[in-house]
């Protein structure tokens, strides 16, 4: 017995024939046999594409076909996130800094057999969750040069090696174990955060410091990297802030090499500058950094290290670091 076609869309010819058969008073099952379609397909077609206007009420083949085409054309414009659990998942992940692209990459893992595009997530936010717009990736803003005080009185960093001399495999992210270091600070507090990030995996470490002194930075960097195997700590790139004065002592303990951005070119540490922007989602500018404990910073660190990245093939920094070094991040 020939199997009836159940799921493909009706053609214009089929819809015109359906109109004729309806006018002849044929029942749904008979029409289905004549069109080689299941009667449920005929029933659904009549419900979806009958003309709703009073003066033309009923099913007209050509109008039904155009109505079906218009519906298909506009289907992508309707919000697609109808599942309550999926909406909750999107909202929770956006609030901890995940982008629509990252979320879309993980939906098929969390919701088996289901996938969605990042564009659908943007549509959902704009149409159904406008309060979530603040969690969307930031638009690029004009960068202003950082203000530096007491430039003339600042002690030069001893034995400073320019970033141009950094190995190409470190610059091009071909080799794991090359880190960047930066200081996150606020005008409202003496407390600062030392932030270090591995360039290949984007693994990040955040340490609360009571001050910006070089001794505090030295202690923090050594403490966070000392437990790693040697292949996971080869070099550290700094800016020219006075807090990095003791870089040689760090090298002596960790057996690393140090490199420095050109003066006032902190953007040459692009990876960590971007990560600082992610941290600012949790700790906005003008916030008193003293209000956050190390335990709270550890929670932010955890979220960042378990956040899939597009540049990592939607793996997490934790996963990439573990695979490339064989070491469990401390």
Image (spheres, rainbow, N blue to C red):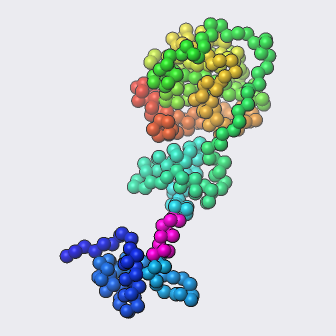
Locate residue 187, reporting x and y percent.
78, 29
Q: Is residue 63 above or below residue 271?
A: below
Residue extending farthest top: 159
Residue 26, picture quadrant? bottom left
Locate residue 118, reporting x and y percent.
52, 50
The answer to if 73 sits in the magenta stretch is yes
Residue extending farthest bottom: 25
Give the left or right position of residue 80, taking residue 3 as reference.
right
The answer to if 41 sits in the magenta stretch is no
Give the left or right position of residue 220, taking residue 203 as reference.
right
Q: Is residue 83 above or below residue 162?
A: below
Tell me the residue at 61%/44% (across/down).
Answer: 137
Locate residue 77, reporting x and y percent.
55, 62
Residue 147, picture quadrant? top right
Q: Main secondary structure of the magenta part?
A: helix
Give the left or right position of residue 149, taking residue 98 as reference.
right
Q: Nearer the viewer, residue 203 or 273?
A: 273
Tell me the residue at 58%/47% (across/down).
Answer: 94
Q: Nearer the viewer, residue 152 or 186?
A: 152
* Residue 311 in sight in this render: yes
Residue extending farthest left: 1
Locate residue 228, reporting x and y percent.
48, 20
Tell me the residue at 63%/47% (across/down).
Answer: 135
* Residue 296 in sight in this render: no
Q: Is residue 11 above or below residue 319?
A: below
Tell me the residue at 45%/22% (across/down).
Answer: 175
The N terminus appears in which quarter of the rendering? bottom left
Q: Nearer the viewer, residue 25 or 232?
A: 25
Q: Is residue 310 above or below residue 145?
A: below
Q: Which residues are magenta?
A: 65-75
């Amino acid at each position: 017995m020939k199997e009836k076609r159940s799921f493909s869309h009706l053609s214009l010819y089929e819809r015109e024939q359906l109109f004729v058969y309806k006018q002849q008073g044929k029942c749904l099952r008979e029409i289905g046999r004549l069109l080689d379609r299941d009667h449920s397909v005929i029933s659904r077609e009549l419900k979806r594409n009958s003309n709703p206007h009073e003066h033309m009420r009923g099913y007209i083949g050509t109008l039904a076909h155009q109505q079906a085409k218009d519906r298909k054309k506009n289907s992508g414009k309707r919000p697609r996130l109808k599942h309550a659990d999926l909406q909750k998942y999107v909202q929770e992940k956006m609030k901890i800094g995940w982008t629509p692209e990252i979320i879309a990459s993980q939906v098929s893992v969390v919701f088996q057999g289901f996938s969605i595009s990042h564009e659908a997530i943007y549509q959902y936010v704009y149409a159904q969750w406008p309060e979530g717009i603040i969690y969307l990736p930031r638009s690029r803003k004009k960068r202003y040069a950082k203000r530096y005080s007491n430039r003339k009185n600042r002690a030069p960093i001893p034995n400073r090696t320019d970033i141009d001399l950094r190995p190409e495999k470190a610059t091009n992210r071909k080799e794991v174990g090359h880190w960047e270091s930066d200081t996150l600070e606020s005008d409202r507090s003496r407390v600062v955060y030392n932030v270090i990030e591995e360039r290949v995996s984007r693994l990040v470490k955040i340490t609360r410091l009571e001050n910006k002194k070089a001794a505090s930075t030295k202690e923090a960097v050594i403490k966070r990297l000392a437990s790693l195997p040697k292949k996971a700590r080869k070099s550290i790139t700094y800016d020219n802030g006075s807090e990095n004065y003791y870089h040689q002592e760090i090298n002596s303990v960790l057996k690393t090499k140090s490199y420095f951005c050109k003066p006032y070119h902190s953007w040459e540490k692009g990876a960590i500058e971007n990560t600082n922007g992610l941290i600012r989602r949790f700790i906005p500018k003008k916030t008193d950094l003293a209000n956050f404990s190390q335990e709270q910073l550890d929670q932010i660190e955890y979220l960042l290290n378990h956040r899939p990245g597009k540049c990592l093939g939607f793996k997490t920094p934790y996963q990439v670091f573990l695979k490339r070094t064989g070491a469990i991040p401390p």
